[in-house]
């Protein structure tokens, strides 16, 4: 077990980590203004033209490692065992948790009441990406020392499930087709904890709908869950969406609200559609502009309308201006979108979901207040990400049922689905394919199409070659990428 710091040492080190980095003059600098070339190179490699959020997260995760490694005299290209030892010290120092060795190179992290296990998992994921970037830059050679280090934080399922059963339960089962693919969750029924697959129909969604009655601000929770079920979006993409998601990208006011011509040929004020049928959500690492089209179900549309009508109107700081503009119109999503456009307010700056104080709603608030309460009421150990896996599994089943016997058409439909999900590489699908049929078909197909796998994948056992990166960047600049290459080989 790694060394557990004293309270004074923990607080002193934690304060040093907190807010220690800044980004000025093209360099990553610490609190004293000193630049770090390695962190700066990682930051430049991970950022994109649209956003640097991922670059900041990865660099901030790597910073405490660099401090401890420098103090211990451990170089960047140290053996994997030394890297994992420093990683254990980073976890105990930064989060004040206990780290115990697991199976193989795995670790079990025991979090206290003040530490969210999801935070530890995200930090571990950022560290894996950071070391992959170090390998890309040539700072390290060989394989990623953290690539196969599985970290189980919080000993899932959570405390309320363990208390009802009386003893610890193993974590949710993992699929054999991806390292981060939870394919089941636990549900407490009586004194037993039953393992339920996400492919068990709509059971997960039904449990969440039933638990919604006990959640504070129920219409908001119901709207977030229904939008997640309809889109398969991540929690952040739903809770932190803006009102721009109600409008198609680059659409005009005339297209949104076409003019209504009366019987005498006179143009009347354009009509507003009554219901939201389509939403647009943003994708991870692709900026905040919503581009991914989502067809809303009747439940999803009703839930969003109910949230606006019953909850959002009471928390909206723009309500007085809306009522002055409305002239009898009801407070609905599309009426509100039209109000923003005609008032000269950018919908991209107005959050779709608000807190009771009228501030932007966040995924952290949703997990802490709404999701935790719903999970306790339902007696389940599922996370919101299970909804994304449930959505993808359902869509893969639908595609297989419709096109599974049509060979090449089946491959094209799978790749079209990958496009709709916003994945830049079809291999992202393997993390969500719990049956394995779609992954197997695509692997076989790309093994027979000339040069497709080489042009699409710059990764070879954790190492990125300059030639492969150049070819991929050329394909992206031309707007082709993996999907365009496939279309050329039809």
Image (spheres, helix red, strand yellow):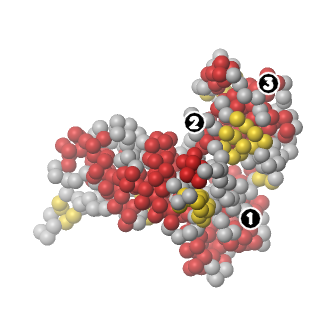
Q: Quadrant of the C terminus?
A: bottom right
Residue shown at 77% from the left, 53% from the top? 459
- Residue 2 placed where, x, y %? 77, 32
- Residue 89 placed where, x, y %? 75, 31
**Nearer to me, 421 or 111:** 111
Mark in the foreground, 2 or 1: 2
Residue shown at 67% from the left, 39% from the top? 110
Other residues around mark 3 within 10 Å, as few (<14) / some (14–19) / many (≥20):
few
User: How far apart, in angstroms, are the residues tagged by discs 2 and 1?
Assistant: 49 Å
**Nearer to me, 359 or 434:** 434
Q: Taking 237 as reference, is 407 left or right?
A: right
Residue pointed to by mark 2: 113
User: Element under label 3?
Assistant: helix
Other residues around mark 1 within 10 Å, as few (<14) / some (14–19) / many (≥20):
some
Residue shown at 60% from the left, 76% from the top? 400
- Residue 406 placed where, x, y %? 63, 82
Which one is earlier in the sequence, the residue at label 3 or at label 2? 3
The numbered disc on residue 70 is 3
- Residue 380 placed where, x, y %? 54, 55
Which one is earlier in the sequence, the residue at label 1 or at label 3? 3
Residue pointed to by mark 1: 452
User: Element under label 2?
Assistant: loop
Q: Is residue 465 visible?
A: no
The answer to whether mark 2 and mark 1 are in CB contact below 8 A is: no
User: Element under label 1?
Assistant: helix
Q: Is residue 315 visible?
A: yes
The answer to whether mark 1 and mark 3 are in CB contact below 8 A is: no
Q: Quadrant of the N terminus?
A: top right
Residue shown at 56% from the left, 58% from the top? 191
């Amino acid at each position: 077990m790694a060394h557990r710091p004293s309270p004074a040492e923990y607080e002193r080190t934690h304060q040093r980590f907190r807010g220690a980095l800044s980004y000025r003059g093209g360099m990553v600098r610490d609190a004293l203004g000193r630049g770090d070339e390695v962190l700066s190179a990682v930051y430049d490699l991970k950022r994109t033209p649209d956003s640097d959020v991922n670059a900041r997260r990865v660099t901030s995760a790597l910073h405490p490692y660099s401090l401890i490694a420098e103090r211990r005299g451990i170089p960047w290209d140290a053996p994997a065992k030394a890297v994992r030892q420093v990683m254990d010290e980073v976890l105990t120092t930064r989060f004040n948790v206990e780290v115990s060795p697991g199976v193989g190179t795995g670790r079990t992290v025991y979090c206290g009441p003040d530490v969210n296990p999801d935070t530890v998992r995200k930090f571990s994921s950022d560290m894996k990406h950071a070391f992959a970037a170090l390998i890309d830059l040539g700072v390290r050679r060989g394989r990623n020392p953290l690539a196969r280090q599985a970290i189980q934080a919080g000993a899932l399922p959570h405390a309320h499930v363990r208390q009802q059963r009386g003893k610890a339960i193993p974590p949710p089962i993992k699929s054999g087709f991806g390292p981060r693919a939870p394919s089941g969750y636990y549900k407490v029924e009586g004194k037993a904890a039953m393992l339920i697959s996400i492919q068990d129909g709509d059971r997960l969604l039904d449990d969440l709908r039933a638990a919604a009655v006990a959640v504070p601000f129920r219409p908001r929770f119901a709207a977030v869950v229904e939008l997640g079920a309809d889109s398969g979006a991540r929690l952040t993409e739903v809770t932190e969406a803006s009102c721009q998601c109600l409008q198609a990208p680059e659409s005009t006011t005339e297209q949104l609200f076409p003019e209504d011509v009366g019987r005498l040929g006179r143009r009347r004020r354009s009509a507003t559609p009554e219901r939201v049928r389509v939403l647009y959500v943003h994708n991870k690492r692709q900026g905040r502009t919503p581009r991914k089209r989502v067809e809303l179900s009747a439940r999803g549309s009703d839930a969003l309308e109910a949230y606006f009508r019953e909850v959002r109107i009471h928390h909206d700081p723009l309500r007085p201006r809306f009522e002055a503009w409305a002239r009898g119109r009801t407070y609905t999503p599309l009426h509100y979108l039209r109000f923003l456009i005609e008032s000269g307010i950018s919908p991209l700056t107005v959050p779709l979901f608000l807190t009771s104080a009228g501030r932007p709603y966040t995924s952290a608030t949703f997990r802490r207040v709404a999701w935790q309460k719903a999970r306790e009421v339902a007696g389940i150990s599922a996370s919101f990400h299970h909804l994304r896996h449930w959505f993808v599994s359902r869509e893969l089943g639908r595609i297989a049922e419709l096109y599974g016997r049509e060979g090449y058409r089946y491959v094209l439909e799978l790749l079209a689905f990958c496009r709709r999900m916003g994945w830049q590489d079809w291999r992202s699908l393997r993390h969500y394919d719990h049956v394995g049929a779609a992954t197997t078909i695509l692997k076989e197909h790309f093994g027979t199409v000339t040069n497709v796998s080489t042009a699409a994948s710059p990764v070879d056992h954790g190492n990125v070659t300059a030639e492969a990166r150049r070819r991929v960047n050329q394909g992206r600049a031309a707007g082709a990428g993996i999907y365009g290459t496939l279309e050329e080989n039809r």
